[in-house]
Image (cartoon, helix red, strand yellow):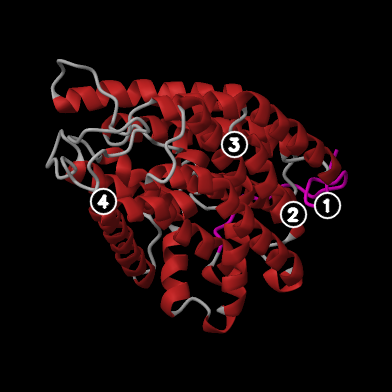
Amino acid sequence: MATASGPTAEAAAPTPPTSISKSERSLAPDIARGAMLLFIALANVPIYLHGRSLDDHNHIADSSTADTIALFIEQLFIAERSRPMFAILYGFGIAVMASRMFSRGMEAKGVRKILRRRSWWLIAFGFVHATLLFFGDILAPYGATGLIALGFVHLSNRALRRWLWGSAIYFAVVGTPLFSIMLTSAGSEPPGVEGLPPYVDQLVTGSIASVAVVFISVLTAWFIPLVIVGMMIQRAGWIDHPEEHLLRLKRVFVSGMAVNVASSLPISLIALGAWDASPSMHSVSYGVTMLGGMYAGLGYICGFALLAHRWRSRGRRGVPGALAAVGERSLTCYLTQSIIMAPLLSAWAFGLGDGMGYLAAFVVAMGTWATTILIAVLLDRAGRRGPFEVLLRRLTYGKGRPART
């Protein structure tokens, strides 16, 4: 069924994709992506820590008071929030691409072909990323989710809502218990294979982890409801035109932050050492955090849309411009985080994560994010896109069609 943004029966001959100019880009999505990458850096950096004993909840057993407080804050506001934000914005991006291609007269079959190629290349990027640098890659599972989302780009809003509720219920019943058990029973140190040289261990562990996470994400529909939400808010114009939806954005932001704190408080109290939960209650608490994080992620995105609206007079200058520069190059900046942090902290390279505490790790994460801001701003001033964005477009469209939709 065609939607308002989909193909029409009397569409003109399709025209090839053209590049989006800076003036055509919406500020809010780019600011949201730029800020989201800080959440990703903070959420990922504890995975690199190693060489210290762990307690029953897989936290560093001999943490200092400062480290414990830092972990408490991260668990309260960041943990299991970056992935939902990324998934929603990924769905938003799919909807933007599909809408632009439909508006040029391209049929649904052609749109799905391009998006399918892009999704497979994201899986390939993610597999290489997980194998060479960081086993916690999220590109590959999102690429796999994108293959499923191909079937949604031409659906009506009513049909999307049905898929949203169906996939959300399925994930809550099937996916959440599985992930809760897996993540609370796994150690906080990177997994490994005994007897292998450190970097060979990384290659083996990373490749296996990438395939496993892709399989599990598809089996549990981990990101499907979030991607659908991203597609729906793109159609509604929430973050493209926040000025038209201020009351709704404020309501979702405020309620999202309430759900954010309420759902993550139990797991945060465990991190603080204020609650010595049983293994079963630890798993339940993690499940509550995951489910609450889905709505909290949307709340954060609505908050960034409101912030972009408040900053609208500044355009792409100053802080908004810096965040937007990162958001425009989110793939490059995401991979750059691993290019910096993995060699710096991992045992197979400089090994600075050996014995490091949470507070120092979060400082490294913030410094890494700041470095990506500097790189993105310099690229922006030079009028250059991110190198990985350029590569992905080239692989998606071919040499003769390097433009971005």
Amino acid residing under circle 2: Arg
Q: Disc 2 marks which residue?
A: 235
Q: What separation in Å lies between label 3 and label 2 (alpha carbons)?
A: 19 Å
Q: Give SS at disc 3.
A: loop
Residue name at image x 45 percent, y 38 percent: 139
Left or right of 215, for residue 302: right
Q: What separation in Å lies between label 3 and label 4 (alpha carbons)?
A: 28 Å
Residue 59's tag is none
Q: Check contact, mark 3 vs mark 1: CB within 8 A.
A: no
Q: Disc 4 marks which residue?
A: 361
Q: Check contact, mark 2 vs mark 1: CB within 8 A.
A: yes
Q: Give SS at disc 4.
A: helix
Q: Disc 3 marks which residue?
A: 223
Q: Give SS at disc 2.
A: helix
Compare residues 156 and 176 and report the one nearer the observer: 176
Going from N to C along the chain, the mark reached first, 3 or 4, is: 3
Pinpoint residue 271: horizontal percent, then vertical percent: 39, 44
